[in-house]
Amino acid sequence: MNCFKFFFVKLIPIAKYRRELRKKLKDNSKKSVLTANLYFPKMKKISSGKGYKKLNVVIVNDTRREDFHLGCYTVMNNLEFLCKKYNLNIIDSIQNIKQDFNDDNYKKTIELSDAVIINGEGTLHDNYGEGIYKAAQVAKETNKKVFLINSVWQNNSDKKGMLDLFDLISVRESNSLSEVQNDGAKDAILTPDLSLYTRESYDFKTKNINNNKIMFTDNVLRNKTADYKKIADSMNVDMLYMQKHKDYIDSFKQLAKYDKIITGRFHVLCLSMVLGIPTIAEESNTHKVNGVLKDSGLLDYSYSNYSNIEEFINKDCLDFINKSSVYVNNAIKSIDNLFKEIRRIVEKSS
């Protein structure tokens, strides 16, 4: 009798919950493909990593939204690609802005996982990101390994006590690394942004420059976007936006039409480096743009260095292309090493 009770009370609800999770993940995957649709080059086919035992993971801070953002979709597509490459089976991918991490369904999901991978992206600055810390706390209460990856870290004086929640912390550039280490995460590592893995995960070619088609993009800071728009209009060149605008950047192919780019967007800089398009970039609300320019040896391509955009347009930018290529190649190796380390930590604990 006790066996029948266990079967009906415990096993059937768990099996039902697993089916619901699989359906949710499948639906989310279809949605992201439909949103990106024809504008993305094809991702390379990949089977689950040979020689790797399957581990179940939950992704927190899935930054894909209905108001399409090329950078966030690229990051999340690459994150899914890497999880498949290293046989990390994603049982749920959660947008933290919509999730109550005290909810029983979230806790059930965590219990079915081996680890939680939190995609920090641009969230953890100026003491923001409450949902990320709550997700980590719930996971730790369930004795799961928690990994904060692909993150900025800046001005988090009220949150530095939360760093102990993470079994591994990986930030995207050296400015964040210095600050997170000063805040107590002495073992934190630097792994460049996951968007840079695009060279490995997508089938596309880098661009040959012609020096005749220029584009400005927006900036998170509206006053700077307004400044760019005035200059773009005066030069009669294109002005595109990362999101929330009819003239938004929807694809790698669209970026590749341009020979030089002026941007206030972190992911435009990253994808320009992947595509080999000379770009000058300006900070917005964090230090991540400056960090990447510094780490790649491209501080000369900071927007603040140019009093006149014509200086950039007329500049021989072969150094940008060469240094970007080296930086992206090294980033790919670092990203692979990060996922190997995640597997090692989880396997060691199990």
Image (cartoon, rainbow, N blue to C red):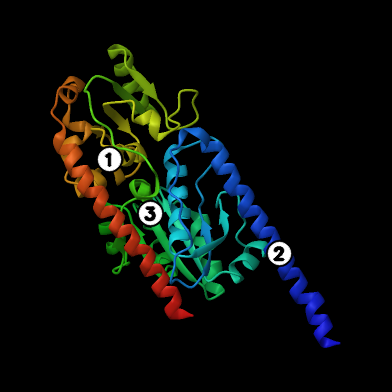
Kindly identify which residue carries mark 3. 151
Kindly identify which residue carries mark 2. 17
Q: Is residue 222 above or below residue 348?
A: above
Question: Residue 326: x, y in percent?
Answer: 20, 48
Distance from the alpha carbon under mark 3 to that under mark 1: 19 Å
Question: Residue 131: x, y in percent?
Answer: 53, 56
- Front residue of 312/46: it is 46
- Front residue of 159/280: it is 280
Question: Residue 111: x, y in percent?
Answer: 61, 71
Q: Residues within 10 Å of mark 2 (few under 14, many from 20)?
A: some
Q: Image quadrant for the N terminus?
A: bottom right
Distance from the alpha carbon under mark 1 to that under mark 2: 42 Å
Q: Which mark is residue 273?
A: 1
- Front residue of 108/249: it is 249
Q: Quadrant of residue 34?
A: top right
Q: Residues within 10 Å of mark 1 (few under 14, many from 20)?
A: many
**Numbered circles on residues, count:** 3
Query: Which amino acid type corresponds to the residue marked 3 in the rendered image?
Result: Ser
Mark closer to the chain start, 2 or 3 = 2
**Which residue is pictured at 27% across the width and 40% down the height?**
273
